[in-house]
Image: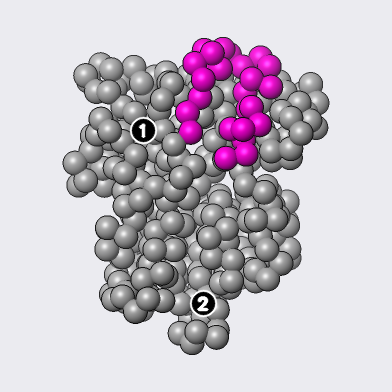
Amino acid sequence: MSQSTPPTIGVFDSGFGGLTVLRALIHRLPHARYAFLGDTARLPYGSKSRRTIARYAAQSARFLVNEQGAEFLVIACNTASALALDAIQEAVSVPVLGVIEPGAHAARAASRTGDVLVIATDATVQSHAYAAACRALGLQGIEKACPLLVPLVEEGWNLPPTTTRSVGAHAGLTPPQAAQVAVTAEVIRIYLAELTAEAAAQGLNPDTLVLGCTHYPLLRPLIEAAVPPGMKVIDSAEAAAEAAVQIFNGRASGQEEPNRGRRPPAAQAASAPPQVAASAPPQVAASALPQVAELAPPQVAASALPQVAELAPPQVEIRCFATDSVEKFERLGSRFLERPVGIVELVDLGG
């Protein structure tokens, strides 16, 4: 890769939730070029067999590498990272990074007790990929599927970005929006209460929560308000982006880069981004969140959702592709990326 030519980074997801990973990458590597592919025609991957997921993911990886010139791939899909990373690595001859191992390494860096909670989709939890990644690092991980959270995000029942990081939590929220946010906050509270009760029943003392789905960063202020006091929240999208930066820094300094087509060394993803350590005050977590101002104090939201100008400088070059539903991608994608995604190009990857 020429020093005068910015690298092209390919980012792949089964949908558009992986745009949160792209957002984190842009914040850290603003001078790179990006090609994002959402395989929206064939989601959800979680209902497919491992063999089918591997085939779909390999096709998407080849598209980004062979047709878009990606020199590095980030698999911004927890299901594909859990079930198809090996197939992707065999399909392309560029470095490949998933989201699960960086998330586990960030949890190791953040946890003092060694006990970790993970919330994710059904498919990711059923794969037990996070539990295995935690176990390999000497952690005890307890996973819980939270199937209601993705549709709540896609329906927009979360705190709008302009609300959570501008003049105050009330700004721009209508009474119906406040009611929707309260419902989502209550769902989160119930899921976390069940998960912490399960951990207590096993005699564990968790101090870290991993967000094991790329939709969940949009819920981070509500999640941080619901976790027990002192619990750290790890965003696997941020952790994956941080790992990618460390890999690129290693390449720039002449260090040996990961073997082509193989996953990067685990140690490169060991450090957690600074913002994962935020905790919620106990009085906020104790309420059912009737007041939006208590749900997302400005200082919490500001750490979770950096300013758009910082995330997407003008020089960033992004091309977005989808295998179906480009209108939905364009409409919802800007919420995940926190900037307009532009015209999404329709591609056909075959059956």
Look at 61% across and 17% down and name the residue there.
289
Secondary structure found at label 2 = loop
Look at 66% across and 14% down and name the residue there.
290
Is residue 299 inside the magenta stretch? yes
Left or right for 245, reference 31: left
The picture quadrant where one finds residue 301 is: top right
Residue 32 position in % (x across, y down): 56, 72
| Residue 208, disc | 1
Residue 273 position in % (x across, y down): 44, 48
| Residue 286, disc | none
The kind of residue tagged 2 is Pro
Give how far apart the Cα atoms at labels 2 and 1 are. 34 Å
Residue bounds of the magenta highlight:
278-303
Left or right for 261, reference 25: left
Left or right for 142, reference 177: left
Secondary structure found at label 1 = strand
Look at 51% across and 20% down and name the residue there.
281
| Residue 110 seen anywhere in this rendered image of the structure | yes
Q: Which residue is mark 2?
A: 7
The N terminus lies in quadrant: bottom left
Q: Is residue 44 above or below residue 259?
A: above
